Image (cartoon, rainbow, N blue to C red):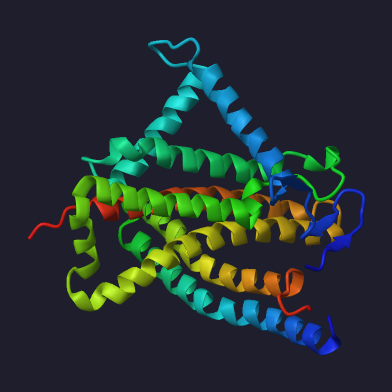
Amino acid sequence: MVPLSLSLPFAELEVGQHLYWKIGGFQIHGQVFLSSWLVIGALLALVVAGTRNLERDPRGVQNLLEFIWGYLRDLARDQIGEKAYRDWLPFIGTLFLFIFVSNWGGALVPWKLIHLPSGELGAPTADINTTIALALLVSLAYFYAGLSRKGFRYFEYYVEPTPIMLPFKIVEDFTKPLSLSFRLFGNILADELVVAVLAFLVPLVVPLPAMFLGLFTSAIQALIFATLAAYYIGEAVHEEHH
Amino acid sequence: MDSITSAASVVAAGLAVGLGAIGPGIGQGTAAGGAVEGIARQPEAEGKIRGTLLLSLAFMEALTIYGLVVALVLLFANPFAG
């Protein structure tokens, strides 16, 4: 690992530098934990604040939360289908909200003001370990969804419509988490790097369009991750009609 | 890292992103063209077309991003650095 570090007051570019914590025999990236706890805390605070005084006519935060809920319900229902989407709405919604708030938090919060001994705070999703963990969760989720709904008939999916598809379907089980995690990680890291490089060249104004593009792609990536997770689960629980 | 390895890594990183951008570029062009055609034919479907277009553009973009990930691995986490 070759740590790269260009020093400039606002825009220090650090790749491959981490705040290492040792827990048990494991070396973990502390800055990712800190920023994901902040993200989780912010989400919890928002939800608790929005649901404390529920009213018949939603106002303010409650209105926002109901809008988000409706949006996520439509997303899950479109992909998973009317029958099974209720079981999986919390999972899909959590994925979407965590990824979305992580991405935007990494871009919008001035993390540089908080000084760490090594590495820097940023979007938790700009670390490959986070995205791989999320993608593996999705893998587990769709296996569980398929097996719990259909039992061992789930494996019929591998030989449908013909047994020739078997190797492709098995390879697909490995490429699904791979592409999910790399897509999210690459997009978020690329956004951060583009902004950092532009800010290194011209510190004022010029990085702004790249930042807005970054916000846009971050939101789309959160949507894509949630949509694909829902699609994979929907594929697993889908009943073939012969 | 010896100089041959670093030179090869830098060239490979450039090629990974550059070549990886060709295919998705063509694909995104085709998709955007199709979307424009669709909107011209049926302007009332613009919202739906735009949503689908953005989603599929992001899927194509992911292919370039894979190249970028490979490039970043070669530059910052080179397994052959020794």
Give the residue furthest to the bottom: B4
User: Residue placed at 41% from the left, 31% from the top?
Assistant: A69
Q: Is residue A242 left or right of residue A32?
A: left
Q: How many marks?
A: 0
The x, y position of residue A108, in whole percent, is 70, 41
Give the residue furthest to the left: A242
Say which of B74 and A199 sits in front: B74
The answer, for residue A201, to whether it is visible in the render is no
The x, y position of residue A222, in whole percent, is 51, 48
- Quadrant housing residue A104: top right
The x, y position of residue A202, in whole percent, is 86, 58
Say which of B32 and B27 sits in front: B27
The answer, for residue A144, to whether it is visible in the render is yes
Q: Is residue A100 left or right of residue A56?
A: right
Q: Is residue A114 left or right of residue A178?
A: right
**Screen quadrant of the N terminus of chain A:** bottom right
Vertical placement of residue A220 versus A156, above or below: above
User: Residue placed at 59% from the left, 39% from the top?
Assistant: A101
Q: Is residue B25 left or right of residue A82?
A: right
Say which of A148 and A61 sits in front: A148
User: Residue placed at 69% from the left, 70% from the top?
Assistant: B72
- Quadrant housing residue A38: top right
**Screen quadrant of the C terminus of chain A:** bottom left
User: Residue placed at 87% from the left, 45% from the top?
Assistant: A117
Vertical placement of residue A190 versus B81, above or below: above
The x, y position of residue B21, in whole percent, is 58, 76
